[in-house]
C-alpha cells in the first residue's frame, strides 16, 4: 500500500520553510520525514506526515501543494540493505524519480521512500524480494 | 566651427520656418483629407475641413491620432498613397494587435535619411568618418535610418546590425570606426567589454556616438563618454513619424532639435488634450508636414517632455525638446523594445495562467533585466523540479514570441503577489531612468 507524500512549492526566501513547519506543528501533526529539492529560485519541500489530509487543509489555502503516492520500504541498518532493495526495483524495470530515507519506527531500521513510475509493480517486486513495504 | 548638413534650413529664421510650415500644412491636410478616409471621418466628426487649416496655428483644430487609431486602422487604413508608390515598410516590435506598420515612398525615405544625416553632422560626422551602425536592421527603423543618413553624409558605413559584441569590437578596432550608433545601454555594454578586454578609452578611434530608442540619464551619458572616450548624443524618433532623426542633439548636448521643416511639435495636457504654452511639461504630439505615404497628423507620442526655443549656441534655430521624462501611458521600454503590461496579460491568459503577475525591471551590467512573477495554479504544479522548470521555460518562450524580448519567469504560490490597497502593483521599475 502506497503512502501519501505532500509536496509544497516554496519560494527561495527567508521564512518560507519556517511558515510551513509552524502551521503543521500548530495543527499537532507529526512530521515523519522531509527533504528539500532546490534550484535557484524555488524549492520543493517533500514531507510525510502523520495526517496528510489535515496537513493539506492547513496549508492548501495559500500554498501550492500537491499529493504524490510514494512507495515506502523498510530497510535494515546493515551493509547491502539498499542494494537488495534497488536490485528488486531494477529487475522490475521501475524508474526512480527520487528517493530519501528517514528513521524507522523499529530501532535498527530506516524507511526508504521512492517516487517511482510504477507503484504497483514496485511494491509487488519488493514484497516478492522479502522487503517490508509500508 | 559648427558644421551643418543643410545649413540654410537648419539655421533658418523663425519666420522662414513658419512660412515653410504653413505652406506644407495646408497641402498636407488636403492630401490626408482626400486620401485617408479614416482621418477624413475624424475631421468630419469634429466639423473641420481642410479650408479651416490655413497655418500651423490651426493645427490645434485637428483631431488627434493615437496608438488605438493605428491599431484600428491596421495594417493600411492610414495609408495615403497607392501601394505601388510605396517603396518600403518598417514596423514596431510587439504583437499583431499592437504592431504599427509604417509605409514610405522614396520621398519619405529621402526626408527621413536627411534628418538622420543632420544628426550625424551635428555629432561631428563628415565624409571622413567611419560610422558603425549597431542598431538592428530589418523591420526596426534604427538600422535603416542611421544607415541611410550615413550614406547621405558620405561616411564609410559599417552595417553591423545589433548583437555579436566581439564582432562589433573587432570591426570597430580594425576599421577604425569614429562614430557609433546604437542604444545607450548597448554602448555602455561595449564600453565595459572593451575594458574587460584590456582596452583603454584612447585605444579606439571613436569620437562620437548617436544613441536612442530607449530612455537614458545624464549619468549614463557620463559613463558612456568616459568608457568609450567620446561625446554621446541623443536622438529621438518613432516608427509612427518615420524613425530616428525626428529630433537630434547638437554639440550643446542640452536637448534635441526637432526637424521643424518636416515635423510640427505640440505639447498637450495628456488628460484634456489642450495645447500647453511653450515651456510647459506635457505630452508631445507630432504632425508630419510633408510625408506622403504615412502622414500622421497630431499623433500622440505619449512621451512627456518640454519644448524650448532658447537660442542654441550651435546656431540651429529649430525648437529643442528635452529628453522624454516619462510616459502618459503604461508603455515600458525594455532593452529598446516597447512593452505593454497588457501584452504580458494576454500571454498569461493564452497559456492558462491567471493574470496575477508582477513585472520587475532592473539594469544589470547596463542591460535591462525583465523578471515576471506569476501566481501559479496549484493543480498544475508537479512535485518534480524539472516539470516546474519546463513550465517556466515554456511560459518564457511564449513571452519572448509576444514581446520580442525574453523574460525570466518565476512561478510563485497564489496570493503572494504584493497588493497595495487591494490593487496589485504590476510594475516595479528599479532602473531610475529619469533624472
Image: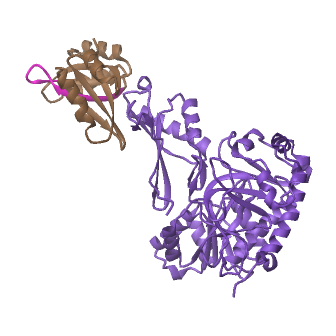
Chain colours: A brown, B purple
The spot of residue A66 in percent (x, y) is 35, 23
The residue positioned 61% from the left and 67% from the top of the image is B211
**With B216 as the anchor, is B293 left or right in this view?**
right
The location of residue B45, given as percent across then percent down, is 82, 40
Residue A77: quadrant of the picture: top left
* Main secondary-structure element of the magenta-colored stretch: strand
Indicate whether residue A106 is drawn in magenta. Answer: yes
Left or right of A10, for residue B16: right
Comparing A125 with B398, the one in front is: B398
Q: Is residue B126 magenta?
A: no
Q: Nearer the viewer, residue B225 or A32?
A: B225
Quadrant where the image shows the N terminus of chain B: bottom right
Regarding residue B424, the answer to whether it shows in the image is: yes
Instruction: Tell which of A42 and B427 is nearer to you.
Output: B427
At 30% from the left edge and 42% from the top edge, which residue is drawn? A13
Residue B406 position in % (x across, y down): 54, 47
B91 up-or-down from A67: above or below: below
Question: Quadrant of the rendered structure where residue B276 is?
Answer: bottom right
Residues rendered magenta in the picture: A96-110
> Is B167 placed above or below B368 here?
below
Q: Position of residue B206 (x, y in %)?
A: 60, 78
Amino acid at each position: 500500500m502506497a503512502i501519501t507524500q505532500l509536496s509544497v512549492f516554496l519560494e527561495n526566501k527567508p521564512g518560507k520553510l519556517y511558515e510551513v513547519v509552524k502551521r503543521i506543528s500548530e495543527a499537532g501533526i507529526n512530521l515523519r520525514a522531509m527533504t528539500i529539492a532546490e534550484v535557484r529560485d524555488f524549492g520543493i519541500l517533500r514531507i510525510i506526515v502523520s495526517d496528510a489530509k489535515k496537513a493539506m487543509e492547513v496549508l492548501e489555502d495559500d500554498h501550492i501543494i500537491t499529493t504524490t503516492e510514494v512507495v515506502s520500504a523498510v530497510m535494515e541498518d546493515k551493509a547491502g540493505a539498499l542494494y537488495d532493495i534497488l536490485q528488486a526495483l531494477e529487475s522490475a524495470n521501475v524508474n526512480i524519480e527520487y528517493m530519501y530515507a528517514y528513521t524507522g519506527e523499529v530501532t535498527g531500521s530506516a524507511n526508504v521512500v521512492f517516487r517511482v513510475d510504477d507503484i504497483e509493480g514496485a511494491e509487488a517486486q519488493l514484497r516478492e524480494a522479502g522487503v517490508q513495504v509500508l | 566651427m559648427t558644421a551643418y548638413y543643410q545649413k540654410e534650413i537648419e539655421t533658418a529664421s523663425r519666420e522662414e520656418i513658419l512660412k515653410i510650415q504653413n505652406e506644407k500644412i495646408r497641402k498636407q491636410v488636403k492630401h490626408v483629407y482626400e486620401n485617408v478616409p479614416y482621418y477624413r471621418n475624424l475631421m468630419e466628426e469634429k466639423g473641420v475641413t481642410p479650408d479651416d487649416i490655413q497655418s500651423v496655428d490651426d493645427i490645434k483644430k485637428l483631431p488627434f491620432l493615437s496608438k488605438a487609431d493605428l491599431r484600428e486602422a491596421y495594417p493600411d487604413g492610414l495609408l495615403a498613397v497607392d501601394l505601388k508608390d510605396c517603396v518600403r515598410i518598417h514596423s514596431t516590435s510587439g504583437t499583431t494587435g499592437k504592431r504599427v506598420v509604417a509605409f514610405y515612398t522614396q520621398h519619405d525615405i529621402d526626408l527621413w535619411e536627411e534628418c538622420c544625416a543632420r544628426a550625424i553632422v551635428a555629432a561631428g560626422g563628415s565624409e571622413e568618418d567611419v560610422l558603425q551602425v549597431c542598431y538592428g536592421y530589418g523591420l526596426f527603423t534604427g538600422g535603416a535610418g542611421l544607415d541611410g543618413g550615413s550614406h547621405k553624409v558620405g561616411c564609410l558605413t559599417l552595417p553591423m546590425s545589433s548583437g555579436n559584441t566581439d564582432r562589433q569590437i573587432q570591426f570597430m578596432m580594425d576599421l577604425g570606426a569614429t562614430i557609433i550608433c546604437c542604444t545607450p545601454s548597448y554602448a555602455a555594454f561595449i564600453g565595459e567589454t572593451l575594458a574587460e578586454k584590456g582596452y583603454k578609452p584612447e585605444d579606439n578611434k571613436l569620437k562620437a556616438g548617436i544613441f536612442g530608442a530607449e530612455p537614458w540619464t545624464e549619468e549614463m551619458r557620463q559613463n558612456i563618454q568616459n568608457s568609450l572616450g567620446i561625446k554621446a548624443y541623443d536622438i529621438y524618433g518613432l516608427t509612427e513619424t518615420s524613425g530616428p532623426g525626428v529630433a537630434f542633439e547638437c554639440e550643446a548636448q542640452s536637448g534635441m532639435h526637432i526637424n521643424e521643416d518636416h515635423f510640427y511639435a505640440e505639447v498637450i495636457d495628456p488628460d484634456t488634450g489642450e495645447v500647453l504654452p511653450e515651456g510647459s511639461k506635457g505630452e508631445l504630439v507630432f504632425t508630419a508636414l510633408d510625408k506622403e505615404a504615412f502622414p500622421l497628423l497630431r499623433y500622440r507620442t505619449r512621451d512627456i517632455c518640454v519644448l524650448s526655443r532658447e537660442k542654441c549656441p550651435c546656431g540651429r534655430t529649430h525648437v529643442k525638446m528635452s529628453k522624454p521624462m516619462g510616459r502618459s501611458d503604461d508603455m515600458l521600454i525594455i532593452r529598446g523594445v516597447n512593452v505593454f503590461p497588457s501584452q504580458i496579460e494576454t500571454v498569461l491568459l493564452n497559456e492558462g495562467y491567471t493574470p496575477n503577475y508582477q513585472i520587475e525591471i532592473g539594469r544589470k551590467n547596463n542591460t535591462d533585466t525583465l523578471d515576471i512573477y506569476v501566481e501559479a495554479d496549484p493543480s498544475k504544479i508537479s512535485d518534480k523540479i524539472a516539470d516546474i522548470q519546463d513550465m517556466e521555460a515554456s511560459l518564457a518562450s511564449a513571452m519572448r514570441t509576444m514581446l520580442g524580448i525574453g523574460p525570466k519567469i518565476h512561478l510563485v504560490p497564489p496570493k503572494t503577489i504584493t497588493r497595495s490597497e487591494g490593487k496589485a502593483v504590476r510594475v516595479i521599475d528599479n532602473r531610475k531612468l529619469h533624472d
